[in-house]
């Protein structure tokens, strides 16, 4: 039984639970290889993972000093998506600490849910491949809500689908959509500084800043005892 004012945790996926960048970068470079263009350096597009495939592709075209219109971008996005669907979990893996912490939180009675801007069917497929789906009461992707993170709706719908209350939830993420989403929903945010963000997590001022997933249980205890958080 959870002895805490917070009974549910809403997790971002990419850059928070799972290091998906290698497979996403490979999908981006598959697009450019088909156009006989050199690979885009991974470190260039990695910070844009949290903003989605279109942002990664656009950054790649900027690298090649090539313009692209919306119709062309939609076409190459289809190529990206087809490749990624077939190669979603080749190099992707859970971050250190996930396999210790997630089962433990689940056993303690926390309601765990995924609140991701990844399309839902891809999030489900990835978590199934990693054998993590069983721990989550809901997996809520951007295509299953009217407004995705950072809109409050995404967090509220995720909590509802998980059978829990938003006002007893904590958001856990690695980038500005997670922080801003938590602020818009008036719930605490625990931020990791190892993920994918164009802005340093420290500069986003989460309620708790962590560098290791293994520190999450202690952060929850800190939040539970801290009555001074201004949300």
Image: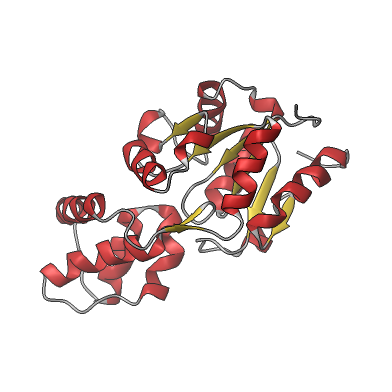
The answer to whether residue 128 is seen in the rendering is yes
Instruction: Work out which quarter of the rendered image holds the N terminus and state it.
Output: top right
Instruction: Work out which quarter of the rendered image holds the C terminus and state it.
Output: top right
Instruction: State whether residue 167 is above or below residue 193.
Output: above
Q: Residue at x 49, y 29 (%)?
A: 138
Q: Nearer the viewer, residue 160 or 74?
A: 160
Q: Residue at x 60, y 65 (%)?
A: 200
Percent position (x, y) of residue 23? 33, 61
Find residue 224 and report its image quarter.
top right
Instruction: State whether residue 135 is above or below residue 165.
Output: below
Left or right? Give the position of 71 relative to 143.
Answer: left
Q: Residue at x 35, y 58 (%)?
A: 55
Q: How is the image coloured?
A: secondary structure
Q: Nearer the viewer, residue 27 or 112?
A: 112
Q: Nearer the viewer, residue 98 or 170?
A: 98
Q: Residue at x 17, y 56 (%)?
A: 76
């Amino acid at each position: 039984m959870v002895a805490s004012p917070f009974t549910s945790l809403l997790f971002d996926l990419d850059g928070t639970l799972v290091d998906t960048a290698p497979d996403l970068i490979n999908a981006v470079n598959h697009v450019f290889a088909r156009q006989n263009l050199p690979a885009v350096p991974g470190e260039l597009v990695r910070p844009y993972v949290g903003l989605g495939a279109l942002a990664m592709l656009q950054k790649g075209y900027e690298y090649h000093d090539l313009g692209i219109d919306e119709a062309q971008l939609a076409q190459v996005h289809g190529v990206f998506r087809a490749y990624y669907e077939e190669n979603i979990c080749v190099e992707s893996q859970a971050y250190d600490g996930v396999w210790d912490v997630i089962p433990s939180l689940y056993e303690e009675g926390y309601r765990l849910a995924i609140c991701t801007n990844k399309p839902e069917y891809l999030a489900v497929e990835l978590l199934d491949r990693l054998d993590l789906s069983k721990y989550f009461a809901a997996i809520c992707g951007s295509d299953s809500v009217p407004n995705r993170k950072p809109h409050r709706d995404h967090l509220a719908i995720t909590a509802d689908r998980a059978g829990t209350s938003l006002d007893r939830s904590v958001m856990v993420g690695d980038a500005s959509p997670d922080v801003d989403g938590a602020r818009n929903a008036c719930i605490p945010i625990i931020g990791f500084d190892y993920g994918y963000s164009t802005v340093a997590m420290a500069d986003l001022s989460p309620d708790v800043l962590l560098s290791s997933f293994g520190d999450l249980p202690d952060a929850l205890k800190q939040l539970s005892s801290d009555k001074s958080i201004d949300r």
